[in-house]
Amino acid sequence: MKRTSITIYDLAREAGVSPATVSRVLNNSAHVKKEKRDRVMELVEKYKFVPNAVAQGLSNKNTKTIGVLLSDIRNPFYSTIYVGIETAAIACGYNAILCNALNDPAIEYQHLEMLESKNTDVILLLGGGADDMPPSLEYQQLVHRIMQNTPVVFASEPNFFDTCRLLINDRPGIEALMSYLLNLGHNKFALVGGLSAISPTYNKQKMISEILERNNLPQDENWIIETQRYEVDDGYQAGKKLFQRPLEEIPTAIIGINEMVALGVMQAAEEAGLRIPEDISVAGFDNTYLSKICTPSLTCVGCAYDIYGEKLMELVKQLVQDPSYREVAMIPSVLAVRCSCGQAKR
């Protein structure tokens, strides 16, 4: 094998360790067992390996890169927010490294170790293990290890780590949505999708419950319908089961935990012969292009994704200058009223 073709990934493979371990040996940045360190250094000598500046992670050199680890780029929420991040990064002279976990914790951990070895200036964790309440012990240990050398920004509300956080503030959008639906005469609601063990879902459930209680509206214990995932089919299956009930027992307003779940509910409603918004009103969260192109177009809560990206880059610049900098930044959500909600007639 020629020396010029050798990478830390080749060394890691031959030594039987992770790329992150090779990086720590080269940088002498953290404790590595002597056995592993010796194996790596033998290969470094064997191939006369010379790491480049990025692999060395020189403390006096910024790489002008940010790592973005997200749950699943196929979800329009994540793809839209990533475009906002990458656009802002390019405008600031940075490159963004996209890491797609595909909703698989094993892939997520693999990406985390890769980002650690890349020596990015800052890592943003968006969804996945960052949203678990609480994160697994393995996840916590890995993130804490990364934080020893690389600033991390969390896009989740639970404060399990001493880091900067960049959050979408759902409160303004939810208040606007519930006020809008209440003014249309709705008093029977269902929130469909997701799991309460996931922080964004839990927060939405809690806020809507508080608003119903504030308006002295009864809360049926079945008004929250959870699903294992956040896909169109999850909304469809939940809606299909819900619409088997007599019309008078069906909530007049159904809120999907995201657009895809809401679209699945709308599909199930059409199959059940229910008209939207004449028979039921449907709304959702995220407000990407999906809300605009469905029929009827979906009333939705979401944030300005370009502003999200710009605020992230502000945090990146602060953290490059001072890794100990801490801020909880909030991007407000807003309501986009479209055609899927109407006057309650029951």
Image (cartoon, rainbow, N blue to C red):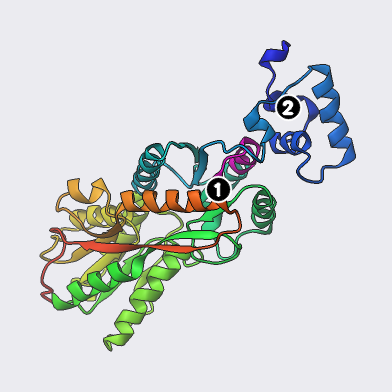
Whether residue 126 is visible to the viewer of this picture, yes or no, is no
User: Residue beneath label 1, please?
Assistant: 320
Name the side, left or right, on which 346 lies relative to 40.
left
Foreground residue, 25 or 255?
25
Which SS class for mark 1? helix
Q: Which residue is mark 2?
A: 13
The part of the chain drawn in magenta is 110-122
The one nearer the camera, 281 or 293, is 293
Secondary structure at numbered mark 2: helix
Residue 221 magenta: no
- Whether the magenta-drawn stretch holds residue 116 is answered as yes
Question: Residue 237 at what x, y percent from top left?
Answer: 34, 56
From what the image shows, is residue 267 above or below residue 168?
Answer: above
Q: Amino acid at mark 2?
A: Arg
Q: Quadrant of the N terminus?
A: top right
Q: Position of residue 202 (x, y in %)?
A: 44, 69
The answer to whether residue 139 is seen in the rendering is yes
